[in-house]
Image (cartoon, rainbow, N blue to C red):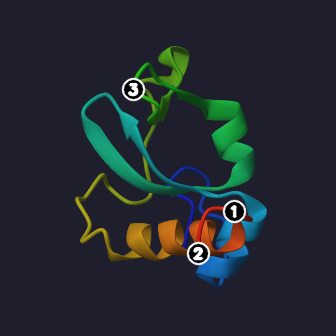
Amino acid sequence: MRCAICGITVETIDEAVEEGWTPYFYDGQTEHEFACPGCSQAILRVDDNGEMEVKEEFRGKMKYLDDGREKSGEDHLQIGIAVLENEPGKLN
């Protein structure tokens, strides 16, 4: 998968989970997929609903590598499952 902001890539979902990638985020009403940890820290914040969004000073000013296309959500589900499997006490 590829960071929608900077373009850096990671080979597997497990690697993305271990490194702390953000599976999706919003710029206004537009959903984008995948942000690497560096971009997440520098450009994103958690909104009032607990969703990741672009910080106000960057909102509407960026060009994304994923073109803001809606995706099937399959990768999001796989990342969510991998996170739950790797967090002690969350399953079982």
Q: Nearer the viewer, residue 68 or 18?
A: 18
Q: Nearer the viewer, residue 67 or 53?
A: 53
Residue found at x 33% / y 76%: 74
Q: Is residue 64 left or right of residue 72?
A: right
Q: Secondary structure at mark 1?
A: loop
Q: Position of residue 84 (x, y in %)?
A: 59, 67
Residue found at x 50% / y 73%: 81
Is residue 85 shown above or below 30? below
Binning the other alpha carbons within 10 Å of mark 3 as few (below 14), some (14 to 19) or many (20 upward) gives: few
According to the picture, the residue beneath numbered tag 3 turns out to be 49
According to the picture, the residue beneath numbered tag 1 turns out to be 89
Of marks 1 and 2, the one in the foreground: 1
Of marks 1 and 3, the one in the foreground: 1
Q: Is residue 33 left or right of residue 43?
A: left
Q: Position of residue 69 (x, y in %)?
A: 25, 58
According to the picture, the residue beneath numbered tag 2 turns out to be 82
Residue found at x 66% / y 55%: 36
The quarter of the picture where the C terminus appears is: bottom right
Q: Farthest residue to the top: give it.
A: 57
Q: Secondary structure at mark 3?
A: loop
Q: Position of residue 27 (x, y in %)?
A: 37, 33
Is residue 64 shown above or below 55? below
Q: Could you tell me the amino acid type at mark 3?
A: Asn
The quarter of the picture where the N terminus appears is: bottom right
